[in-house]
Amino acid sequence: MTRKEFENLTKRIIAPEDYRLIENLYMAAGEMDKAEFCKEIRIMCAYDSANDRIEIRRCLKELGKRVGTMDAELNFLKRETKRKHAELAEILIGKACAYQDSDLYREAVQLIGQREVTLTKLRMDLPLWDEDKQYIEDTLKVMA
């Protein structure tokens, strides 16, 4: 939801810095409908009639900040996990090819998926196994 949508639905103006907090709260609200969310926020927030603005209560501001911080941490951890999985998969792929070990290969596929395993093998200039060739063939058939 954009700031303009929020202001239209609440029929109130909101400061840009407060809207960022509202956006965090809205994203944390899950499957809640925009209109319902705005209706509840309008009820929970104070109204400054002098300049037609919504004043967000302190507890909501703190919740919005906390949700935003937690979301940023979660995104960082997701990126870091993906990076670590890619590093580990590269080692597994190298060992799988060196020892012809299909168990290590399957573990790499579990970590990063067949597409990334095949791309990694191409980047590392490793021989393609039947599974890799089948993946490439299937992908090309879908594209045709």
Image (spheres, rainbow, N blue to C red):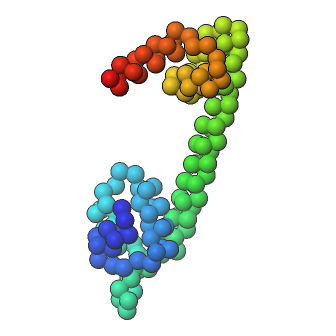
In the current view of this chain or complex, which residue is farthest to the bottom? 50
Q: Is 33 placed left or right of 19 in the picture?
A: left
Which one is in front, 135 or 50?
A: 135
Give the mark count.
0
Q: Horizontally, is 63 left or right of 84 in the view? A: left
- Please state, as top left, top right, bottom left or bottom right, where the C terminus lies in the image: top left
Q: Residue at point 34% right, 55% down?
A: 32
Relative to 122, does residue 52 appear above or below in the rendering? below
Could you say which is closer to the camera, residue 93 or residue 52?
A: 93
For the point 39% across and 86% down, the residue is 48
Q: Is residue 98 above or below residue 16?
A: above
Depth check: 123 or 12 in front? 123
**Residue 61: where, in percent of width, then height?**
51, 70
Q: Is residue 69 above or below residue 125?
A: below
From what the image shows, is residue 18 above or below residue 100? below
Where does the N terminus fall, quadrant-wise? bottom left
| Corner quadrant of residue 28 | bottom left
For the point 68% across and 31% down, the residue is 87
Would you say residue 10 is visible in this rendering? no
The image position of residue 68, as x and y in percent, is: 54, 60
Question: Looking at the picture, how far across and down is residue 50, in whole percent?
Answer: 37, 92
Quadrant position of residue 108: top right
Specify whether residue 129 is in view. yes
The residue positioned 28% from the left and 70% from the top of the image is 9
